[in-house]
Image (cartoon, grey):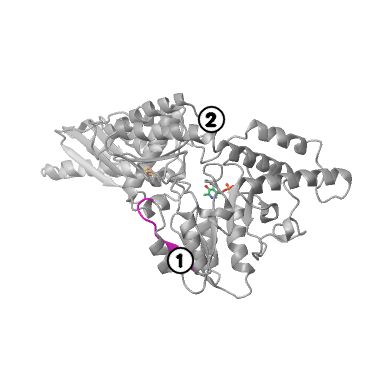
Amino acid sequence: MDHSGTTPIDPRVLEAMMPFLTEKFANPSSIYTEGREVRAALDTARLQTAKAIGAAPEEITFTSGGTESDNLGIKGIALGRKEKGGHIITTTIEHHAVTHTVDYLGENGFDVSFLPVNKYGQVELETLEKEIRDNTILISLAYGNNEIGTIQDMKDIVKLAHEKNALVHTDAVQAVAKIPIDVKDLGVDLLSLSGHKIYGPKGIGALYARKGLKLAPVQHGGGHEKNLRSGTENVAGLIGLGKAMEIGKAGLTTEIPRVKAMRDRLIKGMLAELDDSYLNGHPEKRLPHNAHFRFSYIEGEALLLNLDMMGIIASTGSACSSKSLKASHVLLAIGLTPEQAHGSLRLTLGKGNTDEDVDTVLEAVPKVVKKLRAMSPLGHGGGK
Amino acid sequence: MYSEKVMDHFMNPRNVGEMKDADGVGEVGNPTCGDLMKIFIKVENGIITDIKFQTFGCGAAIATSSMITELAMGKTLDEALALTRDDVAEELDGLPPIKMHCSNLSADALRAAIKDYQNKHLNYRP
Ligand SMILES: Cc1ncc(COP(=O)(O)O)c(C=O)c1O
Ligand code: FES
């Protein structure tokens, strides 16, 4: 249950990719027949990707994934302006692909602000309004948070930003194919997405940039992707992405309701079974596949290792399981103490899961939590 | 990333629990990541005759607690005081470098428990 970490490639996606990994290897920039054939397939993939989010094909730039899309979207806008400098706003709960990009611009002449969020992980409009300045050029915030699953009130945020002449970039890596997305309806100016979170291949993604926006390239070279992203295209990858986007969009009315029902049962069952257990993130405004818990008195790495022994994969925001030995910045930002963040568990459901898996997890997690609590000096050996 | 021995001590920790009538109790926190470890000892004639632990921490923290209780059991206080984090890590067939600080915790908690015992029994002078 770690589908927010990554997903396997859908067999239909693989099937669409296979010819481009084997016989159809021509360079899409070549003008002979074989090249033109690959170029046509690439155009189809761009159209599929665009259609799935309500964009026009020329508004889609293929990249190497969510990270590059975030970099290109944010740096592209910041460096593409004639005037030097400016103010960029992001939040304290973003993926590192965004926070580190904004930090970098902060070290290179831009003013940057990291907005606090409320206890559900939502940006409050009043907070945002106060932070927007005359020279604010860009606001970047994820549509759905990758850890706690909180969904932002994007339309209201965009409306406010546009009133103040600021652009909005959203990292929708976790939201695409989970909730309906129409870029025109949302009004966002830039949107990042990634293949491997939606049953597509790894190392491929796309950036939507509204027509008319001026972006500077991050990667210079032979002028591919309208000079925004040079380098011979990852043909098989982007064919896979196009297919995955198409399947993902269709799944919003079939697969996603199934996943959400399982997720809802998981949350309800877990909170009923264990005392001192809490749901992190927003109770309703959350990605349909995300369940994020906090169990008092125990530590997440120990929980994960036990679950792994039982064949269940999950993730945690505990300091002990991170390379930096710091608790997740997202969990700290929603007001948890490092001790509280210790006992966090993220379960993200997807195509690989069945109702039986939910039953298994609902039995396994309480068992392990109780075992670890019985060992914990913070108490709670008895009880539920 | 963990050795088989670490996993064994983690999944089946030895000497877990609280000791109500302990002769010495040591409690230390981990400044690196905020974990907590508690060790209880029973002492007879200068020898650790029973030992228990409670740990709020990662897999390595639990495994090192378990291991240090095994190492300390039956040892004289001086022998037990000489145990270091390296002894614990070695007995566990090594720990990932990033997890060495967890074994600090176990050695420190044991030392704290022995000091607590010694403070309560002032006639003992090392
Ligand atoms: C919200 C978010 N943004 C960006 C990324 C990075 O995407 P990629 O792995 O395709 O670079 C991820 C994936 O972990 C993510 O969850
Ligand atoms: S106790 Fe936190 S890393 Fe081991």
Q: Position of residue A266 (x, y in %)?
A: 39, 32
Location of residue A126 with respect to A119 vertically, above or below: below
Helix, strand or loop under label 2: loop
Residues at badges 1 and 2 in contact (C-beta under 8 Å)? no
Please report the bounds of the magenta region as a residue range. Answer: A112-120
Q: Nearer the viewer, residue A325 or A18?
A: A18
The Cα–Cα distance between marks 1 and 2, rounded to whole angstroms, is 39 Å
Q: Quadrant of ligand 2?
A: top left
Q: Amino acid at mark 1?
A: Ser
**Residue A199 shows in this picture:** no
Q: Position of residue A101 (x, y in %)?
A: 55, 60
Residue at image location 62% in from the left, 68% down from the top: A79
A168 vs B66, left or right, is right
Q: Amino acid at mark 2?
A: Gly
The tag on residue A113 is 1
Q: Nearer the viewer, residue B94 or B57?
A: B57
Q: Position of residue B16 (x, y in %)?
A: 27, 31
The tag on residue A352 is 2
Which residue is farthest top?
A356
Location of residue B33 with respect to A250 vertically, above or below: below
In the figure, residue A125 lies in which quadrant?
A: bottom left
Dot 2: chain letter: A
Earlier residue among tags 1 and 2: 1
A103 vs B91, left or right, is right
Task: Work out whether disc 1 and disc 2 sit on a shared chain.
Answer: yes
Location of residue B116 with respect to A332 vertically, above or below: above
Which residue is farthest right?
A32
Dot 1: chain letter: A
Alpha-carbon neighbours of circle 2 within 10 Å: few (<14), some, or many (≥20)?
few
